[in-house]
């Protein structure tokens, strides 16, 4: 049996539709679509046309799918692409007038690039990015997996009902978009919590028994997921974000002194899946574990592949337009010292790096097994412009190499069925392996809001059920559920901790908390026999238009299970 490479790309953005444009808001969605999702689809199309086999798993979070299929997305995205073309053209005219020939050529490159993306979106995808990925899955090229509905950070959510609502809503959204049930799921931030007598980490809540995350995944019919290697084999966790955010390095320094890496367990290997059970009762969900060696080669911006001096620099942008014309030059170079990008250097760098990566993978799995390599999809194209081309190069090299094949999660599970039931500790793929990025002195207040809203939602649903599920308040209650799911998004804590869009994250979290509570107040008044005001009804209609994912949300998910 050949060794298998299981690449997992996790695609996600928080809900930004109707909540700003630039610098924070829908431009994030447009950037990711133009720089990551469509370039990946273009790379996959190229592999298909050349008859090169490839297979991998791609996670598209439910909240991302809801946005890409939103009726407002297409027209706004096309206007965004057209503006990028206009900006490149105007840059070219200025560079030509000032005699900057190299920059003029790069402006022409950007004009061609965005025209190609726009043409692919219009003609190949028929303005349907989700449909492009679905077609690849239907053809057996990729396996699409789901996620928690809004990327809620599962270990810290305040109740099993909250975890269940995130996971089951994600499963239902997947069914709506892809016409089948998902077999795999990406746990947000690869974060896991076993069953135990859990006490809320903030506030004054009492401890109570909690189900392990794996139990709720099994209840939802999920067959497999991915976790970080240190949860399986011990050792130091290598955080996937710390190289990219100075604030995380500063934050980590406060926790590092008390961090003691778990002892290494040489009896376990990341090259096969395991059944994880924290209760002694075997659940049905298999866990694949991240391979740390190959992960660092791709993740590290400082000494990994994306840090090649020839590659396009992410941070230095030309205004107006925001196009990038400079190369990395040196990871520690100031923006003023960046040199002009040279596209002619890229092919050789990609070829060398793809060859190196495949050689590492082959060596790791020369005795058989499946090597799992999970990455944020937005690394490929958005952060690392050449990334989609590198991924295609890897597929080419593997097709030429004996003893190694690409695979997807469900196929790997069939070829390497789990043979051992284990328990693993709580943790994530953040530096140090725990929750500090999402729970720290800057974010404690966010969890207090979340826990209050979760408890109130469960109480509302219980009252609604006990009063015979009156239909006149079902839709406002569903909107309250949407606001709660949006409130629970782990993106808000991440953006606060990284300082990358802290004001936006704090504003958004407060917005959804207040929106939820206003709805809850009105619903409680109706349940008490009262009525709502014109102002409240207008607010509901505006919220229902603005925050409109998950139209068939199931209120029963928040009901306490007997």
Image (cartoon, helix red, strand yellow):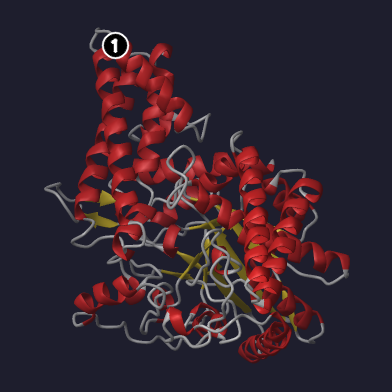
Residue 41 lies, in percent from the top left, at: 72, 59
The residue at 73%/50% (across/down) is: 121
Q: Is residue 510 above or below residue 315?
A: above
The residue at 38%/21% (across/down) is: 540
Q: Is residue 188 toward the left or the right of residue 462 in the image? A: right
Residue 366 lies, in percent from the top left, at: 67, 90
Q: Is residue 46 toward the left or the right of residue 525 in the image? A: right
Residue 123 lies, in percent from the top left, at: 81, 47
Quarter-of-image position of residue 534: top left
Residue 370 lies, in percent from the top left, at: 63, 77
Q: Is residue 494 toward the left or the right of residue 167 in the image? A: left
Q: Is residue 61 above or below residue 439?
A: above
Query: Dot 1 corresponds to which residue?
Result: 532
Q: Nearer the viewer, residue 562 or 499?
A: 499
Q: Secondary structure at mark 1?
A: loop
Q: Is residue 282 above or below residue 483?
A: below
Quadrant housing the C terminus: top left
Crowding at dot 1, Cα within 10 Å, few <14 / some 14-19 / many 20+, comes out as few
The residue at 80%/55% (across/down) is: 139
Return the residue found at the far left.
Answer: 204
Q: Nearer the viewer, residue 216 or 489?
A: 489
Is there any visible trace of residue 269 in the rendered image? yes
Is there any visible trace of residue 211 in the rendered image? no
Number of marks in the rendered image: 1
Quadrant housing the N terminus: bottom right
Q: Is residue 438 above or below residue 233?
A: above
Q: Nearer the viewer, residue 392 or 238?
A: 392
Quarter-of-image position of residue 517: top left
């Amino acid at each position: 049996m050949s060794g298998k490479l299981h690449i997992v790309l996790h695609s996600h953005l928080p809900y930004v539709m109707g909540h700003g444009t630039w610098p924070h808001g829908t431009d994030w969605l447009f950037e990711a679509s133009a720089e990551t999702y469509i370039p990946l689809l273009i790379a996959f199309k190229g592999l298909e046309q050349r008859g090169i086999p490839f297979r991998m798993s791609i996670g598209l979070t439910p909240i991302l799918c809801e946005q890409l299929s939103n009726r407002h997305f297409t027209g706004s995205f096309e206007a965004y692409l057209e503006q990028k073309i206009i900006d490149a053209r105007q840059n070219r005219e200025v560079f030509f007038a000032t005699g900057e020939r190299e920059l003029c050529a790069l402006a022409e490159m950007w004009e061609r690039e965005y025209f190609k993306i726009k043409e692919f979106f219009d003609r190949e995808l028929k303005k349907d990015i989700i449909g492009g990925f679905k077609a690849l899955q239907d053809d057996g090229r990729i396996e699409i997996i789901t996620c928690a509905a809004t990327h809620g950070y599962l270990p810290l959510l305040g109740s099993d009902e909250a975890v269940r609502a995130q996971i089951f809503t994600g499963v239902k959204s997947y069914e709506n978009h892809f016409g089948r049930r998902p077999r795999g799921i990406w746990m947000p931030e690869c974060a896991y919590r076993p069953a135990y007598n859990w006490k809320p980490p903030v506030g004054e809540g009492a401890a109570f028994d909690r189900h392990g995350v794996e139990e709720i995944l099994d209840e939802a019919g999920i067959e497999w997921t991915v976790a970080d290697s240190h949860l399986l084999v011990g050792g130091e966790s290598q955080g996937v974000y710390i190289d990219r955010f100075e604030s995380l390095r500063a934050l980590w320094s406060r926790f590092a002194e008390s961090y003691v890496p778990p002892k290494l367990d040489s009896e376990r290997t990341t090259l096969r899946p395991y059944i994880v059970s924290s209760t002694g009762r075997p659940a049905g969900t298999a866990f694949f574990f991240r391979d740390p060696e190959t992960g660092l080669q791709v993740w590290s911006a400082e000494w990994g592949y994306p840090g090649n001096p020839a590659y396009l620099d992410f941070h230095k942008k030309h205004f107006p337009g925001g196009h990038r014309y400079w190369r990395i030059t040196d990871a520690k170079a100031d923006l003023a010292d960046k040199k002009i990008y040279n596209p002619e250097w890229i092919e050789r760098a990609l070829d060398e790096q793809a060859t190196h990566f495949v050689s590492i993978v082959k060596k790791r799995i020369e005795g058989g097994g499946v090597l799992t390599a999970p990455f944020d999809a937005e690394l490929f194209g958005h952060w690392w412009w050449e990334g989609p081309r590198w991924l295609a190069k890897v597929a080419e090299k593997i097709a030429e190499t004996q003893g190694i094949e690409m695979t997807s999660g469900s196929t790997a599970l069939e070829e390497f069925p789990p043979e051992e039931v284990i328990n693993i500790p709580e943790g994530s793929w953040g530096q140090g392996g725990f929750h500090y990025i999402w729970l720290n002195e800057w974010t404690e207040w966010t969890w207090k809001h979340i826990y209050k809203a979760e408890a109130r939602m469960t109480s509302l649903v219980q009252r609604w059920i006990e009063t015979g599920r009156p239909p006149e308040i079902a839709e406002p209650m569903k909107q309250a559920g949407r606001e709660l799911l949006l409130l629970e998004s782990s993106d808000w804590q991440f953006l606060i901790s990284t300082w990358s869009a802290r004001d936006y994250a704090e504003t958004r979290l407060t917005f959804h908390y207040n929106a939820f509570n206003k709805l809850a107040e009105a619903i409680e008044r109706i349940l008490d026999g009262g009525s709502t005001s014109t102002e409240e009804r207008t607010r509901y209609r505006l919220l229902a238009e603005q925050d409109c994912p998950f139209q068939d949300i199931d209120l029963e998910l928040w009901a306490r299970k007997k």
